[in-house]
Amino acid sequence: MFASFRAELLKIRKRPATWVLALVWCVLLMMLGYVFTYSFAANPPDPPENQPAAVQQQEEALNEQLLDGLLPENLLENLFANGTFSLGAAIVLILGAMAAGSEYGWGTLKTSLTQRPGRFGLLAGKALALGVFIVLFVLLGLAAGALSSYGVALLQDAAVEWPPLEELARAAGVGILTFGAWGFLGFALAMLFRGTALAIGLGLAWALAVENTIALLPIDSDWWKGFRRLTLGENTSSVGSIFGDPNPAFGIPEPLVEPERAAITLGLYVAVFAAISLFLLLRRDVT
Amino acid sequence: MAATVSREPGREERRSYPLVETRGLTKRYGSRITAVRELDLTVERGEVYGFLGPNGAGKTTTLRMLLGLIRPTSGEARVLDEEPGSPAGLEKIGALVESPAFYPYLSGRDNLRVMARYSGAPRSRIAEVLDQVELSGRAKDKFKKYSLGMKQRLGVAAALLKDPELLILDEPTNGLDPKGMADMRGLIRRLGKGDRTVLLSSHLLGEVEQICDRIGVINKGSLVAEGSIAELRGRQGLLVRAEPVEEAARIAERLTGVEEVEVSDGALRLATDPDRAPEINAKLVSAGLRVSELHPAEQSLEELFLELTGGETV
């Protein structure tokens, strides 16, 4: 298994697409999490002439709140509670799908398996290597967020106060669970469809369209809420609330799941997706 | 079928099993398609075994089953006395199945690094096998930039990483130009020397004839013949061209030791011992016939193949 892990690490590390995804992730986080918000809040549009003073004061307070949220002391709240980090879910889903699915497209699964690793060893090595890169993407996200918030502090001439190390470690854990669940969803889909295209297409459709639709549907019943509590998207946003409530300016709905329970659910998703992948690789012929 | 193996001077190891043995090996896809049917195959240690058959005969399916890539529906297979696909067996097997498949964004050397990590082969083997397949000069180039011949050679290099006892090569000359094919044949011949066993699947009759010690012919999933090429050619005979041919045929039919007489293209094919040529010549000449040609007639491998496969093209 360790030999396969080393082989997989080499493959992912040397793959240009891995680093393109890493770059896209960092740019996405900085742009959508900081640059756009800062640009809007720091340079608000001129209010209409007949706007009441009370509304104007309310908007100014909101902008102030948005700018405060971008400062280093609110790093984890902005990244996790406001959902900025969950933007990376789609990126790691693609990473996971590539780690498993490309082997089918290139026909390299047969080449690798005939070298000796055994199906379990090969999959375990792949999963571990994907795990390492998921950790790396989480750390890159935290670093990109920290850099952006530092930039905002400089621009605002504000004090630079970082969250305590303990909180940063917890954030890394939350990020790993979140990215792990989405990354291994992509991994399992690629194993299921024996390729990357359908896995990425369906995975993104689920992440971006279905999950959002589920969250927005105005169905107020217990069974619907029960179903929503199980979805990946709901648990992703709920686990982020461990760092505070989302900024009201973003209009994010209240989380349905306790953060601790959401963390456990995401961990279970990782295990289930890995188990499905193993089952598929062990059971199927490699043609 | 005991075989004595001596891999190191002064050390002898007796192995009582063939390197590859299948009994009743069958692979069905659904209820209608039987890719391989009740296959009994034996490959002995140290031989270069040619696995011959038309396209779609079941060659690649069989090889995939031997490597554990696909599971048989029924029957048994042992490879190096191990279950197909078990890490213990694969440790001693090198394989190139169908087209060579590698990571296009990695160089030839890095592809071999990945494979060496999977197999546990020492890193020093990478340079050795690159030399063996004469690819050292292009080892730093990306796989996607390789020509087909180079890709095939990299496939063989990966198969050699473990210095395997058994080398399984599936159509290794597919798509190569004549020079590439000649180079590959030379390489396989070199690799087959000594103790190493080679199981070579091919649809190129000349290739098999030049390289292999023994062949197995598969058709529609079943093994229709197995043995050395000489054994399979079987019946020896004489080709006689004499005038008038009808009279020559009548005389030949009466000769003792001539089992069968066949007339084709104005010549006689006699199923008999070629050593009887002078005696037969004398009989025909003494009967007043003009004999213009008389020599041993060998069934070509192509004729043999067509006979065994019922005329299926390769």
Image (spheres, coloured by chain):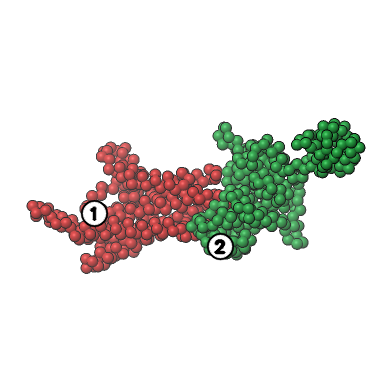
Residue type (three-letter) at the residue carrying disc 1? Asn
Q: Percent from the top left, x then y, of residue B213?
A: 73, 49
Give the position of the C terminus of chain B as an image quadrant: top right
Vertical position of residue B240 compared to residue B118: above or below: above
Q: Percent from the top left, x then y, of residue B124?
A: 60, 64
Q: Percent from the top left, x then y, of residue B233?
A: 76, 42
Identify the residue shown where x is 54% and y is 57%. Answer: B146
Label 2 crowd bin: few (<14), some (14–19), many (20+), radius 10 Å = some
Relative to A276, B173 lies left or right: right
Q: In the picture, residue B221 is in which quadrant? A: top right
Residue A153 is marked as none
Q: Which chain is red?
A: A
Residue B24 or residue A118, whichever sits in front: B24
Q: CA distance from mark 2 to mark 1?
A: 57 Å
Residue found at the very far right of the displayed protein: B286
The reply to whether residue B215 is visible in this rendering is yes
Chain containing mark 2 = B
Residue type (three-letter) at the residue carrying disc 2? Arg
Q: Which chain is green?
A: B
Identify the residue shown where x is 82% and y is 34%. Answer: B245
Identify the residue shown where x is 57% and y is 57%. Answer: B150
Residue named by callout 2: B138
Relative to B61, A199 lies left or right: left
Discs 2/1, front: 2
Residue named by callout 1: A247
Q: In the picture, residue A215 is in which quadrant? A: top left
Identify the residue shown where x is 59% and y is 50%. Answer: B175
The reply to whether residue B164 is visible in this rendering is no
